[in-house]
């Protein structure tokens, strides 16, 4: 399995996880406001401060975005591109969002696939405060109680990243885990192991925003460029034929050459590049 060396000390805890409760709601963001402001209002109206989202349809115009990039400095192992702006309206196809707090204010991390007005299909990291809702966007939301995603300094990568933080919440019925996977840990086996550690036998992946060191798919395809932006299209963890847990995770990504790829990840061959933010919701059979 490939790996990457980050500038800071390797943290002892490779997968962060907090038991929590999630509640699903369906939302539609009206036109006219930024993606950040629209989601801030929607999350607050539903009594939460953190959530994960899967988005479907709608458009953003203008839409600013960033692409994965190699680092030009030893301060970071990888970095992100200069700012781009979509040609015309960006019609959203699919994507995931992690929503939480940065310096006490709402913030979000969004990777998505879209088609621009010139017909080009692209994938990348959407700049939430600069991108305005042009056509209503539909989202499935999983609102979190008992934990927040909070942007904080990460010494290992030298970035400020979303990390799980517990909120003392009495009398909540936990049905999920808020998870962050650190660099060089295989994504699939990390999810399997964290479920085993919490006694969970069946779970659905909710949200899922992060990066991988290239990619290896279970059909034999590989992505060699090592800097990527990734989101999870769907995923679940359940016992395999031998009774041990198996994570099946389908993703979309773009690498630092601008090429896109989609497919199911090969277990044991997909180390995280910088971070991966996920909610695991327990399902029948726990």
Image (tube, rainbow, N blue to C red):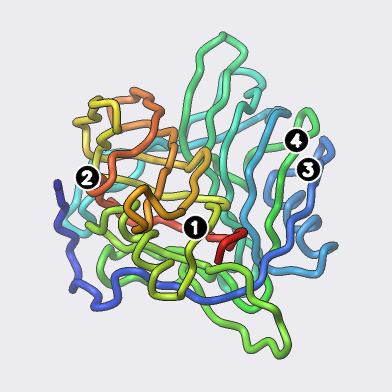
Q: Are marks 1 and 2 in contact (CB under 8 Å)?
A: no
- Taking the spot 38% from the left edge, 31% from the top edge, the residue there is 254
Question: Callout 1 environment at 10 Å: few (<14), some (14 to 19), or many (20+)?
Answer: many
- Per the image, the residue denoted by label 4 is 137
Marks 2 and 4 sit apart, C-alpha to C-alpha, by: 34 Å
Marks 3 and 2 sit apart, C-alpha to C-alpha, by: 40 Å
Give the x, y percent position of residue 139: 72, 42
Q: Earlier in the sequence, mark 2 or mark 4?
A: 4
- Per the image, the residue denoted by label 1 is 278
**Residue 160, picture quadrant:** bottom left
- Per the image, the residue denoted by label 2 is 269
Marks 4 and 1 sit apart, C-alpha to C-alpha, by: 21 Å
Which is in the foreground here, disc 3 or disc 2? 2
Mark 4 element type: strand
Q: Are marks 4 and 1 in contact (CB under 8 Å)?
A: no
Question: Callout 3 environment at 10 Å: few (<14), some (14 to 19), or many (20+)?
Answer: some
- Taking the spot 53% from the left edge, 29% from the top edge, the residue there is 113
């Amino acid at each position: 399995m490939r790996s990457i060396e980050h500038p800071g000390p390797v943290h002892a805890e490779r997968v962060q996880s907090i038991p929590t409760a999630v509640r699903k709601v369906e939302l539609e963001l009206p036109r006219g406001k930024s993606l950040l402001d629209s989601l801030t209002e929607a999350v607050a109206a539903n009594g939460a401060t953190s959530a994960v989202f899967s988005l479907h349809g709608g458009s953003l115009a203008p839409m600013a975005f960033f692409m994965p990039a190699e680092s030009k400095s030893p301060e970071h192992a990888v970095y992100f591109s200069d700012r781009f702006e979509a040609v015309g309206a960006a019609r959203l196809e699919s994507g995931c969002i992690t929503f939480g707090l940065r310096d006490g204010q709402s913030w979000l991390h969004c990777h998505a696939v879209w088609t621009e007005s010139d017909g080009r299909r692209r994938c990348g990291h959407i700049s939430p405060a600069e991108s305005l809702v042009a056509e209503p966007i539909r989202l499935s939301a999983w609102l979190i109680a008992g934990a927040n995603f909070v942007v904080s300094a990460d010494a290992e990568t030298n970035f400020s990243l979303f990390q799980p933080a517990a909120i003392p919440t009495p009398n909540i019925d936990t049905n999920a885990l808020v998870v962050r996977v650190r660099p060089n840990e295989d994504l699939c086996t990390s999810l399997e192991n964290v479920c085993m550690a919490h006694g969970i036998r069946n779970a659905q992946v909710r949200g899922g925003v992060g990066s991988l060191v290239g990619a290896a798919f279970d059909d034999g395809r590989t992505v060699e460029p090592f800097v990527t932006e990734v989101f999870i299209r769907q995923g679940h963890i359940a016992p395999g034929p031998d009774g041990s847990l198996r994570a099946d995770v389908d993703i979309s990504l773009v690498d630092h050459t601008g090429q896109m790829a989609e497919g199911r990840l090969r277990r044991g061959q997909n180390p995280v590049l910088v971070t991966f933010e996920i909610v695991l919701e327990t399902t029948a059979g726990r």
